[in-house]
Image (cartoon, rainbow, N blue to C red):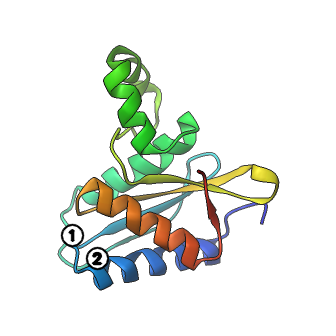
Amino acid sequence: MTELTLDAANRVIAGTLERGRALGLKPLTVAVVDAAGSLIALQRSDTSPAIRPQVAQAKASGAVAMGVSSRKLGEMAVDRPHFIAGVTPFAPHGLVPVAGGVIVIGQGGAVIGGVGVSGDTSDNDEACALAGIAAAGLTAQA
C-alpha cells in the first residue's frame, strides 16, 4: 500500500475500538491521518469526553510530522523539553508527547499515515492503536 485509504482507515478504527472493548478500557477516540498529517477518519466512542478528538488527532499528526511515535516524542520531551516546547506551535494540530500516536508504514518503508488514540492510559491507547493497525493488515513503525 502506498497511501492510507478511507477504507483502510476505517478498518484501523474498527480494530482499535474492538481491542479497547475486549480489554474493557474507557471509551476511546481514534484518529487516522495521512502522510501529511491531514485527517482521513475519526470516531469517538459513546461517552468519550469532548476533548478526545483533538488529543487523538494531535497524537497522530504530531507523530507523522516529527517522524517518530508520540511515545518517542515523550522521551524527547524529557531529554529536550525546550525543543518540544519550541516546535509544538508549528504543528498544525499540536503535539501530545505521550504514547498513543503511531506511524503507519507502507511499501518500501515509506510513511503513509498515523493513528492516534485517546481515552485510557497512554500505554493502553498505544496498544489499541497497534492492534488496529495490525487488524487492518498494515504495519506500524518500529
- Amino acid type indicated by mark 1: Ser
Q: Relative to 65, say whether 46 is above or below.
A: below
Q: Position of residue 86 (x, y in %)?
A: 39, 17
Q: Which mark is residue 24?
A: none
Helix, strand or loop at label 2? It is: loop
The residue drawn where x is 47% and y is 41% is: 62
* Residue occupying image coordinates x 50% and y 53%: 102
User: In this view of the protein, which residue sits in the foreground, 132 or 92?
Assistant: 132
Expressed as whole percent of the image width and height from the top left, the position of residue 20 reads 32, 76
The amino acid beneath tag 2 is Ser
Q: Which mark is residue 48?
A: 1
| Residue matched to label 2 | 45
Rendering quarter of residue 133: bottom right
Residue under the point 35% across and 38% down: 97
Q: Quadrant of the N terminus?
A: bottom right
Nearest the eye: 127 or 47: 127
Q: Is residue 57 above or below residue 129?
A: above
Residue 92 appears at what percent x and percent y? Answer: 46, 37
Q: Tell me where residue 18 appears, x and y as whole percent.
A: 39, 83
CA–CA distance in space, label 1 to label 2:
5 Å
Query: What crowding class fits label 1: few (fewer than 14 Cα within 10 Å), some (14-19), or many (20 or more)?
Result: some
The residue nearer to you, when weighing 134 against 62, is 134
Q: Residues within 10 Å of mark 2 (few under 14, many from 20)?
A: some
For the point 39% across and 64% down, the residue is 127
Tag 1 secondary structure = loop
Horizontally, is 26 left or right of 53 in the view? left
Whether label 1 touches label 2, CB < 8 Å? yes
